[in-house]
Amino acid sequence: AITWAVLLSCITSPFMLLNLIKYYNKKQRAYLASTNPLKQMAKGGDSKSPLFLHVKVHSPAQWGLQEKFRDILHELDLEVVERRTNRDGRGLDATVSTDLYVRDKTMSIHLLKIKEQRKIKRALKHDSSEESANLCMTGSFTGGTKSLSSVSLKSLEKDEQNALENAAKEDDEIIERCSKIEKAIEALFGEGTTVEVV
């Protein structure tokens, strides 16, 4: 009887475990599908996604650096997704390079459908002024030479104008938010600190 019980449990246990894993995988897929912003947008729901930023900080090594980061990020309503810290050099003149990947709790951005992205692309192509050719960014939100809001809208259709105005407004808000983050971190860490938000 004991041998029969052990043999039965050796055969049925893996099948029960597999069924349990399949059940929870199915529940996980259903949850991820219900929280997918692209599917919510297709159903006519909110087409917003959180704003994710990459904050690069180079500062002189000092005591309490990690606590300062934690305090300023909490004050700016930024949630750390990932963090990487490297120390360059030894002694008193060492620098610390910190890469922070953060999610902004105060701001979310619109997910544009492909049709809206094409409207913006067409609008940018129509604007043939020399200044709009330099619209590309240098890598930092605040280091760009020009913003979308300075593109001429005169020769565009109404829906293209609306799409471009909305994208420009959102772009300007992102640039303003990134500038605020850069200034706050630079002010906290003081002289010798460089901050770049990408």
Image (cartoon, helix red, strand yellow):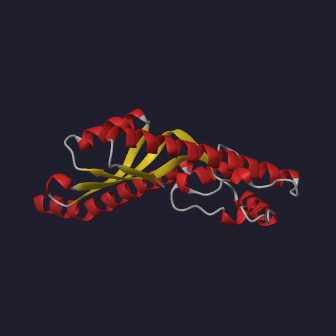
Q: Is residue 48 visible?
A: no
Residue under the image location 40 percent in, 50 percent down: 195
Front-lying residue, 178 or 16: 178
Residue under the image location 26 percent in, 54 percent down: 96
Q: Position of residue 37 (x, y in %)?
A: 59, 50
Q: Is residue 195 visible?
A: yes
Q: Is residue 131 above or below residue 35?
A: below
Q: As drawn, which residue projects farthest toward the left? A: 2
> Viewed as shown, does residue 159 lie left or right of 23?
right
Q: Position of residue 88 (x, y in %)?
A: 23, 61
Q: Position of residue 30 (x, y in %)?
A: 51, 51
Q: As drawn, which residue projects farthest toward the top? A: 75
> Viewed as shown, does residue 107 lie left or right of 18?
right
> Viewed as shown, does residue 90 lie left or right of 104?
left
Image quadrant in which the N terminus is located: bottom left
- Count of marks overlaid on the render: 0
Residue under the image location 82 percent in, 53 percent down: 153
Front-lying residue, 65 or 122: 65
Residue under the image location 53 percent in, 42 percent down: 177
Front-lying residue, 119 or 92: 92
Front-lying residue, 53 or 132: 132
Q: Quadrant of residue 186?
A: top left
Q: Position of residue 62 (x, y in %)?
A: 21, 45
